[in-house]
């Protein structure tokens, strides 16, 4: 369940014009490890009231491009990776702040062969992001494997005390895992964010349908199949990136 009534007033200026039939605050494109291009997003959203944020791993190329095009209602944002694999979703009110944050705090610390990590700690990014009028959210807090921060990051409750929001619906995850995230958000008194965490086009379409239709059990089977296809595609892209730089 999307907690649209629990998002922060931070997004109010972006939500002008009434209800949005598609809100997605976690998207990846081919600027990092996704397979989605900006032309697809422009075409898909052109007749749909929407609010999105392209939050590529340690990259802002697609977000800036879409923002400057004026064709998409987009929140400046990034998914910044820390040196131990922890990640933050950081949103900005101004595109200039996103660019400045990236140039000063992300670009100098990127690895040549690791798309989703940088050489800086979670303490560093919490402090630096606070220098801007930003909103910080923890994505997939009860995710799979290393993305399950509740199980593999012993400092997680220190971080939840310092961020603004927790991602309570991630379309790549199960109902159970999203329920756990929602429960943590409530217990910590945080705002909510949510998104597709899409890396392929079908995940965007699936999340749109989730927001605008009622589904049978077959929908959830298809959702899982799309996510499996995404994982396979992403593994290939990560491997290609690694081999290309070595």
Image (cartoon, rainbow, N blue to C red):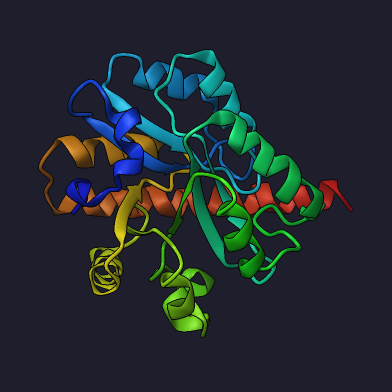
Picture layout, residue 125 above or below residue 28: below
The residue sitting at 30% across, 27% down in the picture is 50
Picture coordinates of residue 132, whole percent (x, y):
56, 45
Picture coordinates of residue 129, whole percent (x, y):
58, 53
The reply to whether residue 169 is visible in this rendering is no
Nearest to the observer: residue 218 or residue 29: 29
The residue sitting at 23% across, 67% down in the picture is 179
Picture layout, residue 115 above or below residue 12: below
Picture coordinates of residue 167, whole percent (x, y):
36, 57
Picture coordinates of residue 33, whole percent (x, y):
61, 45
Q: Splitting the image into 4 quarters, where does residue 202 fall? A: top left
Residue extending furthest toward the bottom: 154
Name the quadrant of the N terminus.
bottom left
How many marks the image carries: the answer is 0
The reply to whether residue 135 is visible in this rendering is yes
Q: Splitting the image into 4 quarters, where does residue 62 fall? A: top right
Nearest to the observer: residue 30 or residue 83: 83
Picture layout, residue 158 above or below residue 128: below
Residue extending furthest toward the right: 246
The residue sitting at 46% across, 68% down in the picture is 162
Q: Splitting the image into 4 quarters, where does residue 61 fall? A: top right
The residue sitting at 56% across, 18% down in the picture is 68
Q: Is residue 81 left or right of residue 168?
A: right
Nearest to the observer: residue 136 or residue 231: 136
């Amino acid at each position: 369940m999307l907690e649209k009534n629990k998002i922060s007033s931070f997004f109010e200026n972006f939500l002008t014009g009434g209800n949005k039939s598609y809100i997605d605050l976690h998207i990846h494109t081919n600027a990092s490890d996704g397979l989605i291009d900006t032309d697809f997003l422009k075409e898909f959203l052109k007749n749909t009231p929407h609010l999105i944020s392209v939050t590529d791993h340690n990259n802002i190329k697609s977000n800036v491009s879409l923002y400057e095009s004026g064709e998409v209602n987009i929140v400046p944002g990034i998914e910044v990776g820390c040196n131990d694999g922890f990640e933050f979703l950081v949103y900005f009110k101004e595109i200039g702040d996103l660019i400045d944050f990236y140039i000063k705090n992300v670009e100098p610390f990127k690895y040549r062969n690791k798309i989703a990590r940088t050489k800086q700690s979670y303490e560093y990014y919490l402090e630096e992001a606070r220098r801007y009028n930003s909103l910080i959210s923890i994505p997939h807090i009860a995710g799979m494997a290393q993305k399950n921060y509740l199980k593999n990051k012993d400092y997680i409750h220190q971080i939840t005390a310092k961020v603004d929001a927790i991602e309570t619906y991630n379309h790549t995850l199960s109902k159970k895992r999203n329920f756990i995230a929602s429960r943590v958000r409530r217990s910590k008194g945080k705002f909510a964010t949510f998104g597709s965490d899409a890396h392929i086009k079908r995940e965007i379409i699936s999340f749109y349908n989730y927001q605008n239709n009622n589904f049978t059990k077959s929908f959830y089977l298809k959702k899982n199949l799309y996510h499996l296809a995404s994982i396979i595609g992403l593994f290939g892209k990560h491997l290609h990136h690694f081999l290309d730089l070595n």
